[in-house]
Image (cartoon, grey):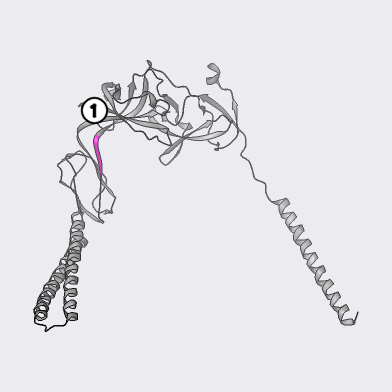
Amino acid sequence: MNPEQSKNRRLLGLIGGVALAALAVKFMTTRHESATAPAAVSPPLAVVQVHTVHAATEGGALQAIGRIKNVRESTITARAMGKVVRVAVKSGDLVKAGQLLAKLDDADASGRVSQAKGALAQADAARVIAKQNLGRFEKLRESDSASEAKYEKAQFDYQSAVGAVEQATGALKTADAYLRETTIAAPFDGRIVDTLIEEGETAAPGHPVARMEGGNDIEFEASVNASDIAGVAIGLHVTVILDGPAGEPIELPGDVGEIVPAQDAITHTSLARIKMKPDERVRSGMFGRVRFAVGARSCPSIYVPSTLLRRRGQLSALFVVDEASTVRLRLVTEGAQRGGETEVLSGVADGDMLVVSDVRELLDGQTARVQPNAIEGEK
């Protein structure tokens, strides 16, 4: 081996040693980081007290919660953009079809109409000239004084002018329609339930302006548990019980007119619409119950301490313990208030274990250990 080869071997050995040392340092650092990385923390065990929900039965009749509504209800919305310059109605007003409800600033829409009218006038003038020019070439062609190419060019100019007139006419119709949308009118005879916009606001397409109801026909819209809806049939006679003045109940007869086949994915209920005769004591929005004489279990009437409810915006929820002894946050629908308690209309079912102990520190998904409590012990 010559001196040059020996020198190269020593250099390669030195480089390899440095590389092995670097790998060793990286390996030790990785092990250190892995040893010091925090482990995933599981939620702590939740020690809770529960109360089993039981469905009530009243006279062998199925009951469901709901409200009175007008058969013909409508939310009137804006179909153009603009500043609201006038609101012509207020809650409780009786209106006729076509009557003004609100007016939007129409300066922009009027400008569009003027532009469209000008464009149509120009297009029509061009059509008249093109038609006259075509007529001259037709006479020249008869005497062989015009070439075929010039005659075809005159035909093309005239057809283009006719198309421009049609296009301008369509643009004017669109501008007129947009201008009409700045006037928001009642679509039918009825009563204004509520106004949803004020003067000075900027309306946009889809922005609600007012809520209306028409006629005196009313119905009761009831939310029936999915497990009970099979016992309800169209035409079934029912009794609607409403909360009247001073707490006096109002009982009225009715018939099941419609059952909505779709089920609410959150509350697990289906809508049943009850036809009723008009009554001067009844107004839309009144809360109540409907009793179906089908010999079935009624929907549970459950009152819980309001402190058990977790509220976020318009959503309310309760904690329950499932069959796997896991705490679950269940979305519910709130009903009437009674002292420090709130009625739960839907979201809990017969046999659910409702957490009745302190819920302030509970988390969805915690493993639960159920402790006996006085309420359950009395049963």
Using residue 220 as the reference point, say whether residue 149 is left or right of it: left
* Residue marked by disc 1: 282
Label 1 Cα crowd, 10 Å radius (few <14 / some 14-19 / many 20+):
some
Viewer can see residue 164: yes
Check disc 1 and give the amino acid type: Val
The quarter holding residue 157 reads bottom left
User: Which residue is rendered at x = 13% and y = 75% of the image?
Assistant: 130
Q: Is residue 115 left or right of residue 245?
A: left
Q: Give the side of residue 35 with respect to residue 96, left or right.
A: right
Q: Is residue 70 magenta?
A: no
Across and down, in percent, residue 106 comes to 19, 58
Identify the main secondary structure in magenta. Answer: strand
Using the image, determine if residue 211 lies above or below residue 15.
above
Q: Whole-percent x and y of residue 75?
A: 26, 43
Q: Residue reaching furthest right?
A: 1
Q: Quadrant for residue 239, please give it.
A: top left
Residue at the far bottom in the pictured view: 145
Residue pushed farthest top?
A: 59
How many numbered marks are there? 1
**Where residue 266 sits in the image (x, y, percent)?**
43, 36
Q: Vertical placement of 295 versus 95: above or below?
A: above
The span picked out in magenta is 71-75
Q: Residue at x 69, y 51 (%)?
A: 37
